[in-house]
Amino acid sequence: MRRLLRRTKAKAKAKAKDSTMTAPTPRCIIIRHGQTEWSKSGQYTGLTDLPLTEYGVGQMRRTGQSIFQNNRFIDPSHITYIFTSPRQRARATVDLVLETLSEEQKKHIRIVVDEDLREWEYGDYEGLLTHEIIKLRKSRGLDVEKPWNIWRDGCENGETTQEIGLRLSRVISRVQNLHRLHQSENKPSDILVFAHGHALRYFAALWFELGESKDVETDHESANPNSYQDDTVPYVTLTKYNYLIDNPKFLLDAGGIGVLSYAHHNIDEPSLALAGAFICPPEEESQHGTVTN
């Protein structure tokens, strides 16, 4: 009996040890840049390179303190990559959020500036308010049958929904490919993505494969735009991509954070982490075996 008890305890101890070696499910943490004058006023800000307001600077400093120090929502040692839009409002937000980390903590985090993460190119609507865009389109004889919907109609002399859908699909394929690699190595992997209001809401919708699916057919769709410079991030060639045809009805205010992850520890089941940055240890996560729905 004693020998059996010892064996049982040994098995339990070995199981516990194995469970603690399991890395957390990878996460993609999306962070919208801090406040700018135009994000505050509601003006559409695409390629215009605005700085953060004084409030926006303090806002993102406080965010960094909250997620890394006060509440420890994110373990700095789990961050493998940061992808950011090239706009200064996004890059400054990266610096401010990481400000509380030591140089030792930051040195293993690779920061990738990716042109594919730029905000929707608004074209003729750059700097305008929504009611001004509606008035402009009406003066041009548009929207006679149904009101303007940027998620379906895009922007005159800017990007169509297919164009932004294509480039954001490329980013998602890179992030998920890295997650797959890190998971195969049993390596914790939080990848942070810093970008903009429309782009990140669109990104989140495509993460769940919402919208319409389209095969890659044209040279434009299959071309590698060389949107980033980092040899450690493999370029993933798309065979298809998704684009939206309606508002996904997601909110993400300036400075907001969202968490995307995977169900059942499966990279092929991208999901929204409703608990956000609140996580439990891997050994305490719900286990559903081979459940796929």
Image: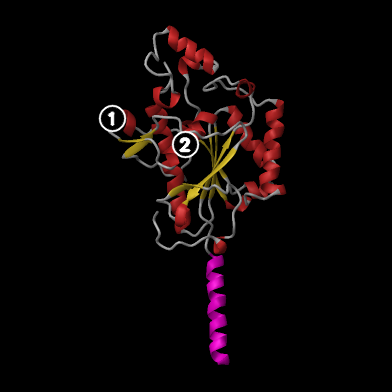
Q: Position of residue 125 (x, y in %)?
A: 49, 16
- Horizontal relation, residue 62 to residue 5: left or right: right
* Residue type at numbered disc 2: Phe
Neighbours of disc 2 within 10 Å: few (<14), some (14-19), many (20+): many
**Magenta highlight range:** 1-21
Mark in front: 2 vs 1: 2
Above or below — where is 18 with respect to 63?
below
Magenta segment includes 224:
no
Q: Residue at x 49, y 31 (%)?
A: 199
Is residue 192 found left or right of 60 in the rendered image?
A: left
In the displayed structure image, the side of residue 192 where residue 158 appears, left or right: left
Question: Dividing the image into 4 quarters, which one contains the C terminus?
Answer: bottom left
Q: Tell me which residue sits at (41%, 8%) in the image.
A: 140
According to the image, label 2 marks what residue?
203
Q: Is residue 59 above or below residue 49?
A: below
State whether residue 113 appears in this view: yes
- Report which quarter residue 10 is drawn in: bottom right
Q: Residue furthest toward the top?
A: 139
